[in-house]
Amino acid sequence: MTTSRINLQTLTNSRFGVWLALAISKHTPPWLGYRIADFGAAITAARRHSPLVRALRANQWVISGGGLSEKELRRAVYEVLHQHTHGLYDFYHNLDRPQEVLRRTDFDPSFAGLFEQVKSGQHPALFLTPHTSNFDLAGRSLALRGLNFQVLSFPRPPSGYQLQNRIRTEVGIEVTPMGIEATQKAKQRLRSGGVVLTGLDRPLADARLRPRFFGRPAPLPVAYVHLALQCGVPMYVVACVSPRPHFYRLVCSPPIWPQPHPDRDSELLLNTEAVLAEAEKIIRAYPRQWAMFYPVWPEVQV
């Protein structure tokens, strides 16, 4: 297979890709690991016509308001990949270093009080997360600090995702690929005062509804609104951001209480858009930390 034909997303999501990143990160010191991460980011960013880079370009262009020049777009793509590869190194390198994970993470005041409430098991909450900064390391820090929670993950995960999910379960995180059984578990957990976490910004191939995100319709998930309505629990946008290199902070929105509406589609769209509006605020504050490698707006080509 020639380099030009390698599908970067397939490689990254494969068991081999995850194993390779894990092996390099665990067995190299930071000075070398970060250099390898820089090299990987540069090589990937240079492949402008790959699906991954095209998705990053389109996503960054939209969240900028369509105002990035070609030079600025290329720089934005590299910065996203640079931040992401460094975050991967920090995550995998410190898998067996729980104290280092805790040292590299903290809570914004917006999240600190909520954490103490939900940790008690008496404050049910639905955490909705964008793919910002080092969200895996942040999730690990939550578990290490004593929070029990269930993750509703991508359904039918590829082999690399399966390995990543196994890594997540090592610290007690319950990872359940989205489906009927997983949704029932999530309802039980929420009704018992627990916490459920799921992503909000990965586009769906078969989306029927398209809530507006950054002013444009996007094929994003809406099913979590059903959960919140059926269980009567608040939704929070919880995100990981990096205020300085190799340090990570959890921030969150105010509670978003689901609002019923007589029309089901309107109910789903209005509530989802309330969530996405909060996610937009975080992404706008840290645009180069939004590592979404799939096209959120498929019609955008830049």
Image (cartoon, rainbow, N blue to C red):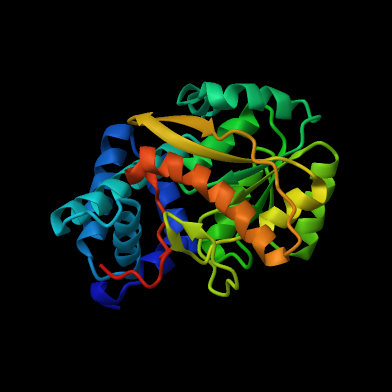
Position of 37 compared to 110: left or right?
A: left
Looking at the picture, does residue 1 appear above or below residue 10? below
Looking at the picture, does residue 146 appear above or below residue 57? above
Residue that appears at 72% across and 35% down: 148
Position of 84 compared to 217: left or right?
A: left
Asked whether the viewer can see residue 133, the reply is: no
Residue that appears at 20% across and 50% down: 75
**Is 174 in front, or is 18?**
174
Position of 229 compared to 246: left or right?
A: right
Q: Quadrant of the N terminus?
A: bottom left
**Numbered-mark total:** 0
**Is 192 in front, or is 153?**
192
Q: Position of residue 280 (x, y in %)?
A: 45, 46
Q: Position of residue 140 (x, y in %)?
A: 57, 36
Looking at the picture, does residue 72 appear above or below residue 28? below
Outermost residue on the left side: it is 71
Q: Position of residue 188 (x, y in %)?
A: 84, 48
Residue that appears at 42% across and 57% down: 215
**Is 136 in front, or is 2?**
136
Place residue 121 in its image quadrant: top right
Q: Quadrant of the C terminus?
A: bottom left
Q: Position of residue 88 (x, y in %)?
A: 41, 44
Outermost residue on the front side: it is 262
Position of 143 compared to 123: left or right?
A: left
Place residue 207 in its image quadrant: bottom right
Asked whether the viewer can see residue 162, the reply is: yes
